[in-house]
Image (spheres, grey):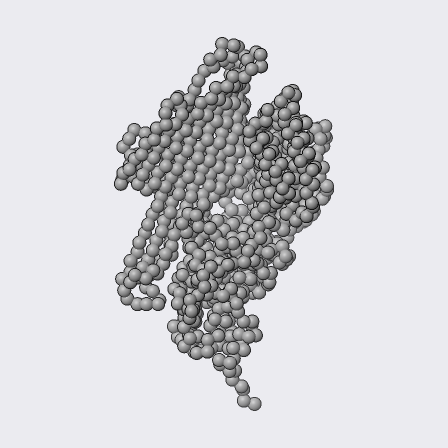
Amino acid sequence: MIDRDTETSLRYLREVIRSGKTEIIPSSAQAVLNSLANSKCCRDPGLQDALINLLKFVDHHVDVQSTSKLDQPEGMRLVDELQKELLSSRSRPQPEESISSYEVEEPDEGIGSTVSNASTGPDPGLDELLTQLNLRQVAKFEPKFPEMNGESEEEDGGVLTEERKEERAEKHGQKTCEEEVETLPDGTEVRRKKTRTVNMSQSSRQVTISTRGGGVPCVSRRFIDGNHSMNDDTDFETTDFFTSPLSRMKRDRANFLNPEQSIGFESTSSEPGQSQKTKTVEATSEVTQSVAQKTQKNGRVLAENAAHKIDTTELNARQIDTFKGKQLTDRKGDGTYEEATIFRGGLPGIERTPADSPVKKHVVEYIQTFDTKKDPNADEFLRGTTLATYVRLNDSLRLHEEQFRKKLTFEFSSSGISTTQSDFSNLAELLQSCADLSRIRLPKKFQDYEQKAITYPERKYIGAPKSVLECLDVTDYLVLKDREAAIRPSEIRGGPIDALIVFATQASGSLLYQEAFLSTYRTFASSHDLLQKLTHRYVYMALSSEPASQKAARLTFSVIVRVVDELCTVEINKELVAIVTNFVYRLIRDGNFQLARLLRTRLIERIESSAVVRQPTVYMDRLKKGETLLDFRSATIAQQLTLLDQRLFQAIEPAELLWWAEAQDEKRCPNLVAFTEQFNKMSYWVRTVVLTPKEHKERERYMNKFVKIMKQLRRLGNFNAYLAILSALDSGPVRRLEWGKMATEQLKEHAVIMDSSGSFKIYRTALVETAPPCIPYVGLVLQDLTFVHVGNVNYLHAEAVKGRTDLLNFGKRWQQFAILDSIRKLKRWNYSFTRDDRIIAAFKCFTSLTEDETWELSEMIKPRQRRNP
């Protein structure tokens, strides 16, 4: 008999194939794999073959560029074959199932811990494991909106009022289910099942708690109290959730999962025999906090901002105990724990408009907007000022951190479980010493790097001489910083490429090194080659039953998932997809349905997200007759310009910055090109708007308007649009005209920020001191990455490493990582503004005159003076 989920997913896939909807076939087949992941028949070879054949058929349509016609009869036949194998697998003897343990982690600095397989004492259980998870605390959300100075540039005097509105709510749901399955001597199964569910919801003034199950009728209690307190005797704390960090979650979990409070039962059968008892726990939490602020003057709205933060957690865990009579003979368990924070502008439910379709033009023009020529002391500035600035920026952003996502996938058995804390090191210290080769420890072993085709090793080859990819510990192959104290694993200076890959999957490695490796590996290996090497390492380690090899396999799989998660659109092709899908088939063949399900899900999600075509912006509103840009407040215009920049900035992949710095290849950097094109278009649009009016008074009004908009953009931390307008107002065609004293003096003050002396020290300081959200001037980031690339060799100098020429210079990668990591952190933040299509319509898609046309207009306004002969 097929379980209900599997039967439903097969029926749905059959209907998708029949209808020929190739765009949803991959996700439909994924539903089948998901339903089979927890099946007891996952070790059946016939079932594995049928599933692999079906997935191979489906994966012809995984590639978004695939145009092959769907063979409907063949697809239906493969579905029928899988269904047949499912029905017959129940009667076939199953191979002995090994207990595997794995972990997959999406970490962030200082967040949580990982779950690994190590002994913590006899007979651990689900409750013991869950108590070791470090559930985060949710504090009261206090967004910082742009400050109002109490003055409106459009009007003087009047009464200024501010209104603040807060809506806060939380929901918690907890469910325990216990099921006992006893197998009688005649093969009959007796099942007993009990569940208990507790749901709690709390808004700013109301709390509702509902309980059902456990042999009692449904009970619902509601509490309303202006002081947000509850005087009833409940399991929940009686303090205001939003005035202090959340400590209740840990207490709820402890109370709910306490064995004394769980719904327990004993076998009522007098027949001796084997039985199993399954306990599942589902716990979900959602905390939504919305804050809105409105500033008015004389009844006119000057500013209206809103922001909300959603904190969610989801826990799913299962424990299976096997008894012989009343004696516990085995215990297994698995589950996932995931937590996430999302910070968004506007009120919940507001959808973002897709970004404009990128137009490929000149990144070079964007970078050369300001004087970015390399001076004789550029190298010293880079080491003494530039990199130190990025380290300070990272530290500053960490203090304002509002968003992260962490996911742990774990399994445990009677052998035990434990938690380990992630290792972090000082990036500033690493950067200070990365150029000093006088104090390094050379490798004890050397390995010539050769690019070879990777093939999966077989079990019989485990005893053969190992390659670097098959080593458990590659420390002896690496160039390390030489210190009197013990060498810390993150102080990697270089080594063979294969050794650097292995160290990212090594238990003794550090999370900081792994993050640097994943951010910069494209400078020495393609994603295609890296995935080949990682899958080779996983298969080799998984073939061994040694605990150390099994742990290396788990860590390697974790890195594989990270690589797939962070693939760029231009990297996804048939060859790369084939590497991942073939590895998925291998996992299924080995009975690792859980890992196969996880990896294939991530691959499909990444392909589908890369296939999304950005639609042109549709303007819902139009300007009123006679309405111009001057009719809108400068602060509101700045907000809308920032929203347009934000969408394009969020789309930039860190790899695009590296690729452009190395090869200036705009075809591989579509999102970067779109962002820089927006800057160039905005700059020429400002010049056009200022120069087009025929009357000097009108031109003066636009000039002053843009100076005020710049002031608001600086306050918002949008340096990109700020500098786009600055470059326009300070351009030759505009600067040569006569302007009022106030506008001229203010423009000079703004221009100071891009003083190129000291490697743009003033701008860098302003960037570090700006609280997020923030949009940087990416042109300087590209220049810094270019300096790092040109000023550092890819491989360590042969004379410093005993003549070796194959030792990659990872000190260069540390510098690149310091720059890229700050951009990654900035991309996590969103502005708390809502879109206003009327104002965006006033931008007229940034339609502008050309460079020559702006000069012609300027010379018509103020003709050039002819010199006397």
Seen in the image, is 509 located left or right of residue 342? right
Residue 654 place in picture, x, y as percent: 56, 51
The answer to which quarter of the image holds residue 590 is top right
Q: Nearer the viewer, residue 58 or 347?
A: 58
Seen in the image, is 361 located left or right of residue 453? left
Q: Nearer the viewer, residue 795 or 418?
A: 418
Name the residue rendered at 51%, 40% in the picture.
107
Quadrant of image for the C terminus: bottom right
Seen in the image, is 48 located left or right of residue 289? right
Name the residue rendered at 31%, 54% in the picture.
163
Callout count: 0
Name the residue rendered at 31%, 34% in the picture.
222
Q: Is residue 329 above or below residue 831?
A: above
Residue 849 place in picture, x, y as percent: 54, 71
Name the residue rendered at 47%, 59% in the picture.
620
The answer, for residue 274, to whether it is visible in the render is yes
Quadrant of image for the N terminus: top right
The answer, for residue 474, to whether it is visible in the render is no
Q: Nearer the viewer, residue 650 or 777?
A: 650
Q: Is residue 230 above or below residue 702?
A: above
Residue 362 place in picture, x, y as percent: 59, 63
